[in-house]
Amino acid sequence: MVASAARRREPFSGVRPLDLIRDLRAVADLIAEAFRDDMDPAGERAVREMRLAGRWAFLFGWLDRLSPPGEGIAPGFVWIEDDRLVGNASVRRIGSLGRGWMIGNVAVKPEWRRRGIARSLMEAALNLARSQYGEWIALQVRSDSLAAKSLYESMGFQATGESVQYRRTRFIDVAPSELPAEGQLRRGTAFDMQSIFSVAQAALPQGLRWAEPLRRDDFWLGLDRRLSNWLTGRREAWWVVESSFGLVSAVHLEVPRPPDDGRLRMWVAPPQQGRCEDRLLRAALASVGDAARRPIGAMVPAGQSAARAALEAAGFEVRRTLTHMRLDLR
């Protein structure tokens, strides 16, 4: 009897599903520690929101427990060692009809690394996706994180492409380009929505689409969007280049109120790449006035050298390069 009671009091060690009420604040602390060097203002805000949600999780945590697997506020797994949270991996459904899954925030405390914890968390995530009839699962990893890439490759993940994250903190004044160029550069209008969406689909390499899914609603330029910008104080600019073949490229820049970074996206149809990136970028930055002096982030496929050159000439600096990896579960 005494031995049985002692066994019941032994601290738990191993993988279990993340429990919002018990784990959220500890996961926020772990993510802040593990990704300290990569954290931008949006990431810092997300960690703060996780900590705040953790304080109030006792009020709504039961909703998370009732959510389907891979959904809810914080789906995933944690590794517990002697009742202490030392590892985490999130996993959630993405894509249409839940066929795709995404793994994120694979993190282990430094003193507990190289003990197989990350692999165990990954295996739990894969098993969950398989049990829910997922067709594929994907993740992003820093291209210079050789140990993590080696782990994922050993589990069957294959690289599908690379993207480069930029952030503009060096404020070089830019003016609209005066160089002669093909096509008409003009502001985008509500009538361009479908054309911009089509160009964006053509410009984004297939291997990166799972991580940067394009939604038609994101390209809506109507009156309600302008009203939202006015109410929130967000500055926004859409510019396009139109040639005899139709609309061939577009750029979107939005700069919210501080402290959030702005965001720039640029799409150039493959046949036109290398011909209009600098014009588009300069027009977008010049059209938002002083808001262009705020920090602005951008993500570009690694192979689009003209877009990268235009960003770097305008003061954008590389923050990190990400390798996109995917595993077929069928």
Image: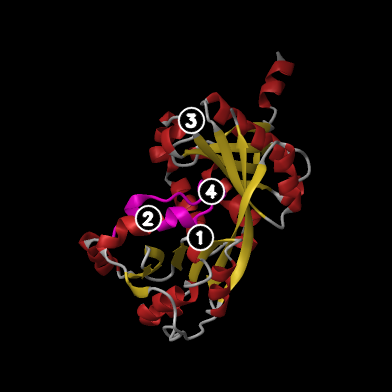
Q: Which residue is mark 1?
A: 270
User: Horizontal placement of 31 versus 147: left or right?
Assistant: left
Query: What amino acid does circle 3 point to?
Result: Pro
Q: Residue furthest top?
A: 1
Q: Nearer the viewer, residue 269 or 81?
A: 269
Q: CA gap, disc 4 to disc 3?
A: 27 Å
Q: Residue 102 is drawn in which quadrant?
A: top right
Query: What amino acid does circle 1 point to?
Result: Pro
Secondary structure at numbered mark 4 = helix
Residue 83 visible, this orientation: no
Secondary structure at numbered mark 1 = helix
Q: Which residue is mark 2?
A: 197
User: Horizontal placement of 113 versus 169: left or right?
Assistant: right
Determine which of the numbered discs, if any, sits on residue 206 in the image: 4
Magenta stretch: give its range. 199-220
Question: Upstream in the sequence, badge 4 or badge 3?
Answer: 3
Q: Residue at x 50, y 55 (%)?
A: 204
Count residues near mark 4 (Cα–Cα under 10 Å), then give few for <14, some for 14-19, many for 20+. few
Q: Residue 90 is drawn in which quadrant?
A: top right
Dot in front, 1 or 2:
1
Q: Which residue is mark 3?
A: 69
Q: Are marks 4 and 3 in contact (CB under 8 Å)?
A: no
Residue 92 x/y as whole percent = 50, 38
Secondary structure at numbered mark 3 = loop
Determine which of the numbered discs, if any, sits on residue 129 in the image: none
